[in-house]
Image: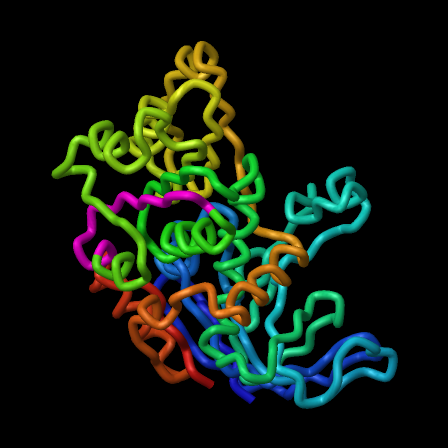
């Protein structure tokens, strides 16, 4: 079988390796879809601070179980599944508290350990999440980023009947906005400078505006009234947007930090203190978030087709990376078909 590997920055190759055999508590998955995210592109370019080469990528996936180990009890041959890509110790304080998404020894498939970029993979049954039979493999590969959005919204106060502002309309920001709406938010607004991504947001039923062309404070008052947003989610990971969040937040607001910051931003902590703002980090997800993501799709609460920009075949992985590099913010989600 073929396995994808990045040997060094921008150097993708395919290895012919033996198909793995599941041990007694593992399942063998025939991979069907792999989604590419922004973090994958950082690795491809050699800019990811916590990934070394060579590395097999792939963490947004869906596939079909074709074999199970003798002690696998939760799954059977033919099940459609996705995978939680965290590898955790199970012993540190966060793990013992059930917050294994922030395990002190966290490794992530495709970054600090072998990813799922292969025709067949073996996975421990506890990392597998079953998908409904009728769910497409495309949607199954979107469960991982959708779980990021679900987890982020749950890090703040109650979403239902609240006003939600999302800064950034990329794949994660879009899904955060859609999840907020599906979880009962009163009003949702997304800011995004890319015309292409604003158009995708509108196709998904979201209100999206360009903060470079509009006075954001005025637009917030038009959308939310004098109360302003109850929760702000930063989904970009740059100084300008987190500074914007702090400056426009009304007193007592939760600001959830979802974007991954490459550079250290300057934040007006005096305003954070004076306004009793809560800056709350959000990292990855738990199985509960995965299950909720599956339910949101199964219950037809989301518009996902507009997020899928295009498909590439497995052996075109390198071309897919280059396509994303060329398109920049003119692309949302690229899928690899196996």
Q: Position of residue 32 (x, y in %)?
A: 51, 83
Q: Is residue 241 visible?
A: yes
Q: For the image shown, how many numbered marks are present on the structure?
A: 0
**Most extreme residue toward the left, as rendered?**
213
Residue in front for this viewpoint, 154 or 228: 228
Q: Residue at x 43, y 52 (%)?
A: 181
Name the image quarter holding residue 43: bottom left
Q: Quadrant of the N terminus?
A: bottom right
Name the image quarter holding residue 272: top left
**Location of residue 288 with respect to 317 vertically, above or below:** above
- Check if residue 79 falls in the magenta segment: no
Q: Position of residue 146 (x, y in %)?
A: 49, 59
Q: Position of residue 117 (x, y in %)?
A: 52, 74
**Most extreme residue toward the right, as rendered?**
71
Name the image quarter holding residue 331: bottom left
Question: Viewed as shown, does residue 324 lie left or right of 46?
Answer: left
**Location of residue 254 with respect to 123 vertically, above or below:** above
Residue in front for this viewpoint, 266 or 307: 307
Question: Viewed as shown, does residue 36 lie left or right of 105?
Answer: left
Q: Is residue 120 visible?
A: no
Q: Position of residue 70 (x, y in %)?
A: 86, 84
Residue in front for this viewpoint, 203 or 82: 203
**Location of residue 261 with respect to 17 vertically, above or below:** above
Q: Residue at x 35, y 66 (%)?
A: 333
What sort of colour scheme is used for the picture?
rainbow
Magenta range is 185-198
- Check if residue 191 falls in the magenta segment: yes
Q: Residue at x 64, y 87 (%)?
A: 19
Q: Residue at x 34, y 80 (%)?
A: 312
């Amino acid at each position: 079988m073929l396995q994808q590997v990045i040997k060094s920055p921008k150097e993708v190759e395919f290895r012919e390796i033996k198909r793995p055999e599941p041990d007694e508590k593992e399942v063998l998955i025939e991979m069907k879809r792999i989604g590419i995210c922004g973090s994958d592109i950082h690795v491809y370019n050699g800019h990811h601070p916590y990934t070394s080469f060579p590395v097999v990528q792939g963490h947004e996936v869906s596939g079909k179980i074709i074999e199970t180990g003798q002690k696998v009890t939760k799954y059977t041959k033919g099940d459609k599944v996705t995978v939680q890509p965290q590898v955790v110790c199970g012993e540190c304080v966060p793990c013992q508290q059930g917050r294994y998404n922030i395990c002190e020894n966290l490794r992530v498939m495709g970054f600090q350990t072998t990813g799922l970029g292969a025709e067949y993979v073996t996975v421990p049954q506890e990392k597998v999440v079953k998908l409904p039979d009728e769910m497409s493999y495309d949607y199954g590969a979107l469960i991982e980023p959708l779980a990021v959005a679900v987890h982020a919204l749950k890090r703040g106060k109650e979403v239902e009947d609240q006003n939600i502002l999302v800064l950034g309309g990329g794949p994660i920001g879009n899904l955060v906005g859609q999840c907020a709406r599906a979880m009962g938010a009163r009003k949702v607004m997304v800011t995004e400078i890319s015309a292409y991504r604003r158009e995708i947001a509108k196709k998904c039923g979201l209100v999206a505006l360009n903060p470079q062309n509009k006075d954001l404070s005025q637009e917030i008052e038009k959308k939310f009234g004098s109360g302003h947003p109850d929760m702000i989610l930063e989904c970009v990971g740059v100084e300008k947007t987190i500074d914007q969040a702090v400056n426009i937040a009304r007193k007592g607001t939760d600001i959830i930090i979802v974007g991954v910051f490459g550079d250290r931003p300057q934040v007006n902590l005096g305003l954070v203190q004076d306004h009793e703002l809560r800056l709350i980090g959000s990292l990855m997800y738990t199985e509960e978030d995965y299950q909720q993501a599956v339910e949101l799709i199964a219950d037809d609460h989301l518009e996902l087709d507009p997020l899928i920009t295009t498909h590439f075949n497995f052996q075109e992985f390198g071309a897919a990376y280059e396509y994303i590099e060329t398109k920049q913010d003119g692309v949302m989600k690229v899928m690899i078909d196996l």
